[in-house]
Amino acid sequence: MKDEVLEKYIRLLGNEEEPNRVGEMTEKELLLGRTLKRMREYRQISLEDMSEGICAPSDMTAMENGIKASLLMTAAYLTRMGKSVNKFEFYSTNLEYSQQCKRDHIVEVWKSNELEAAKGYLAEYERYFRSKFSRRWGDWQRRCIALRGGELPGENREVWEGLVRQKLYFTQEELDYLWELAGFYERTGEADRVHEVYALMYQNTMATGMFLPQNSKGMDEERKLEILPELCMAYGHFEHTHGRDENALQVLDTAVELLQKSMRMKLLRELLEERMQIRRELWETTGAERMYQGMGADAQNLIALDLVYGNIPKVYERTKWLREETKWESTILDSLYTALEKRSD
Amino acid sequence: MGEYNIGQFIYRSRKAVGLTQEELCRNVNGIICCSVETLSRIERGKQRPNYRTMRDIMRRLGKENCFCTPYLKTTDYRVLELNRELKRILTLNDYNKAEELLAELEGELSLQYVTNRQYLVRIHATLDQRQGRITVEEELEMLERALKMTVHSYGTKNFSYEILLPEEIVTVCNIADSYGKLGNIDKALVLLQMITEMLNDMTLQINYPAGIYEMVYRNRIKWIGEKGLYREAIEECDRAIADCLKRNILNTLPSLCYARAYNMQKLREIYRKPSEGRNEMVDLDYIKCALLAELIQDEKGRDKALSKLV
């Protein structure tokens, strides 16, 4: 090892002679709360704005000062800032774990349309967890259950106006509400309202100039992964069925590029199918070269996914279509076609 | 996100350093951080420690995590995002770009914190070895010293008690890889088996971030295959691929398909008759790898898989 390389490791490894098995450490812990407080103050967001819709400002202060730490409240704080919880390690008690499981269960039950059961579980949850933080969460669930049941909540207008005015990113509960609202308007046939709701969710997720316009990168990639695939699928499909193909493509592009960059597959196949379909239609009607190239690339990526899911008939069908009907040229596909032909022999 | 049951974490960490509850509660100077009854309730998950107690317990265990924290110690969120980008670049084996990012990251991290130093040692050792500046033996030495900075029971019989954080798991995988490269495949597999058991232990109530399981799988498959256990390696590949599909993880799929094809090819070489030509099943796996690599924009991976078809 060269001297300069060795020196680098000596500097980084530090003094290994210091007792560090058990005893008093000299390192300072860095609490999540301090990081979040710094982010909030840098962006000149008040405690009231940050805690609005989540909990009382005093709860938030306690969290920022490390007096209180709750996974659920931290997650809400982070999502409000457009950040993901994925960069942090959380240590929770059995009670917090149980609270999270109960919440997840309630959401799962109303999403399965068991609305009466969901109401029962929610009432039980609220008997056990009585903080303002828990009550706010409960309110959002009640609104979602009402929408799912075909009823527009009485306070919908105020809630909607609040969401439109929101300067920060939506929490998961607010997004769930907007999903249910879009579903409600779809069932009542109010297409313009559906478009408004999807557009609001999309704009909020993609916004970059939320806090300090000159220095904002927008929402974390991990947080976007939690929202965009599903949202872009629904929104893109809606725009396509209502004849707004360019907008549909832009929305679908957002999600596909995000998934490719972060190497995740959630809804990737469905997004590529939708996008390929739109590109194919546009190529067939306009003959645009970029639509042809895009369509071919999407089809090839779909073949990759079909292969990995073991859907060989679909792989064969798509490969044949690409080669023979669209005259798409690709070395990989030629090899694939040969291998498939041999296999069928 | 890594989410850990606080009671389990403290209990296992205490066992790993070989302390009784009484010894943990009272340090060598006789200072008490909490009563044994309180510690017992904390370990059983019945009570959440307050900040001061948690801090004292963690310090006495040689850990510096408290409640919820990023592994890298910084108040600048951008640093955590740089870390993410660096991981992505390393997945794509773009070592030159990785070195640029590491330099930027290093400039932002304070060396006052042991986890920051540990992280930097690990990344430097990996890159230095890949770029030929240090040998595999030297890389192994650095990695083991880095791990011991936060996992003091490493190398002792109590190591199996530890609950490792994701960065520590990556370090152990890197150590296993080094042992494998030095010919000590059994040692590599023992380490990876220990990690696998910890990850699959449902009683710990731990949620590990996406990609951790797949990374450990991939490492195990590599060394099982190198031992000549091709059938076992193929079975592991199938399990790992099914797991990736279940968790919607794309980044390890190309390398798993490649590993499957490679091990299948090796198995065929043992049993194949001289007159038999190429096998289309093996080719299909290499093609799968190439297509998936193209999907995640990994040109090197794609070309490597395609070269196997010639």
Image: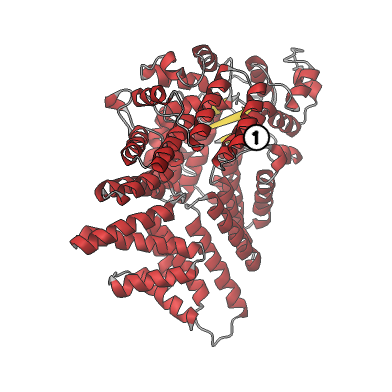
Residue B86, horizontal then vertical, whole percent = 43, 41
| Residue at horizontal 45 percent and vertical 76 percent from the top | A340
Q: Give the image quarter of residue A216.
A: top left
Question: Is the C terminus of chain B in the top left, top right, bottom left or bottom right quadrant?
Answer: bottom left
Q: Is residue B53 above or below residue B106?
A: above
> Neighbour class for label 1 at 10 Å: few (<14), some, many (≥20)?
many
Q: Give the image quarter of residue A301.
A: bottom left
Closer to the camera in the image, A8 or B65: B65
Q: Secondary structure at mark 1?
A: loop
Q: Residue furthest bottom?
A: B275
Question: Is the N terminus of chain B in the top left, top right, bottom left or bottom right quadrant?
Answer: top right
Closer to the camera in the image, B240 or A6: B240
Answer whether residue B134 is visible to the viewer in this image.
yes
Answer whether residue A85 is visible to the viewer in this image.
no
Q: Is residue B74 above or below residue B188?
A: above
Residue B18, horizontal then vertical, whole percent = 77, 31
Residue to which mark 1 is pinned: B151
Residue A30, horizontal then vertical, whole percent = 53, 21
Chain for disc number 1: B
| Residue at horizontal 59 percent and vertical 17 percent from the top | A131
Q: Give the image quarter of residue A187.
A: top left
Residue A260, horizontal then vertical, whole percent = 39, 50
Closer to the camera in the image, A28 or B293: B293
| Residue at horizontal 66 percent and vertical 22 percent from the top | A127
Residue type, mark 1 in image: Val
- Would residue B15 appear left or right of B62 to someone viewing this image? right
The image's colour scheme reads: secondary structure
Q: Is residue A217 above or below residue B51?
A: below
